[in-house]
Amino acid sequence: MSGEKIEMQAIATVVGGHAAPGDDYQGGVSSIIRLNPEFPLETLQGIDEFSHLIVTWHFHLASPDDVALHARSPRNNPQWPATGTFVHRNHRRPNQLATSFPRLLKAEGRDLHVTDLDAVDGTPIIDLAPYFKEMGPRGEISQPSWPTEMLQHYWDDAGA
């Protein structure tokens, strides 16, 4: 692959929460985003005033061999149309990154207690920020029907 090489280091790690990746039942699980000790505590000052975070994380359990640079049906379901690599939101994209929007329950020192983070225990966090509703999508959201069908149980309670 061509392109500029970018080096990044994790700023935090997920502690607890999901033990293994899953396609569904991601809801209701609490975990901690633990900021690395080289960052001063004041880098989190004021974050507890926000209800949600934007968390960018790495699919660290996936292999680079999992990257799929071709069109395929989501979850290999032939009832859904074959779509390209950048139309999927899973570990098969080239940089194997994900973005999640967990609810912040509380900030305690370097620990951000969250729920509904769909990363697993040990996941490296590349970046985090508070969610500003003003920075969310503008205008009406449109999408085909297959994501709604595919994700109908995604945020169901993990204990179900």
Image (cartoon, grey):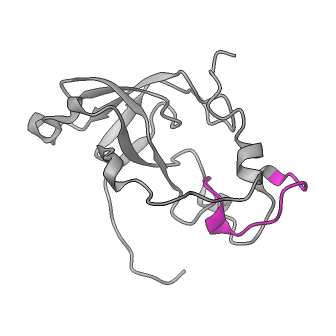
Number of on-image labels: 0
Please tell me which residue lies in front, 156 or 113: 156
Q: Residue at x 40, y 43 (%)?
A: 124
* Quarter assignment of residue 33: top left
The location of residue 18, given as percent across then percent down, is: 55, 27
> Magenta: predominant secondary structure element?
loop
Q: Give the range drawn in magenta.
A: 76-92
Is residue 90 magenta-colored?
A: yes
Kindly give the residue lying farthest to the top in the view shown.
159
Left/right placement of residue 68 relative to residue 2 reads: right
Kindly give the residue lying farthest to the bottom in the view shown.
2
* Quarter assignment of residue 109: top left
The N terminus: image quadrant: bottom right
The C terminus: image quadrant: top right
Left/right placement of residue 7 relative to residue 88 reads: left
Q: Residue at x 62, y 59 (%)?
A: 142
Kindly give the residue lying farthest to the front in the view shown.
139
Is residue 119 magenta-colored?
A: no
* Quarter assignment of residue 110: top left
Left/right placement of residue 50 relative to residue 142 reads: left
Q: Which residue is drawn at 90% across and 56% down?
A: 78
Left/right placement of residue 89 relative to residue 17 reads: right
The location of residue 128, given as percent across then percent down, is: 31, 46
The location of residue 131, given as percent across then percent down, is: 33, 44
The location of residue 31, given as percent across then percent down, is: 43, 24
Whether residue 59 is situated above or below residue 18 in the rendered picture: below
Please tell me which residue lies in front, 111 or 147: 147
Please tell me which residue lies in front, 121 or 27: 27
Q: Residue at x 15, y 42 (%)?
A: 39
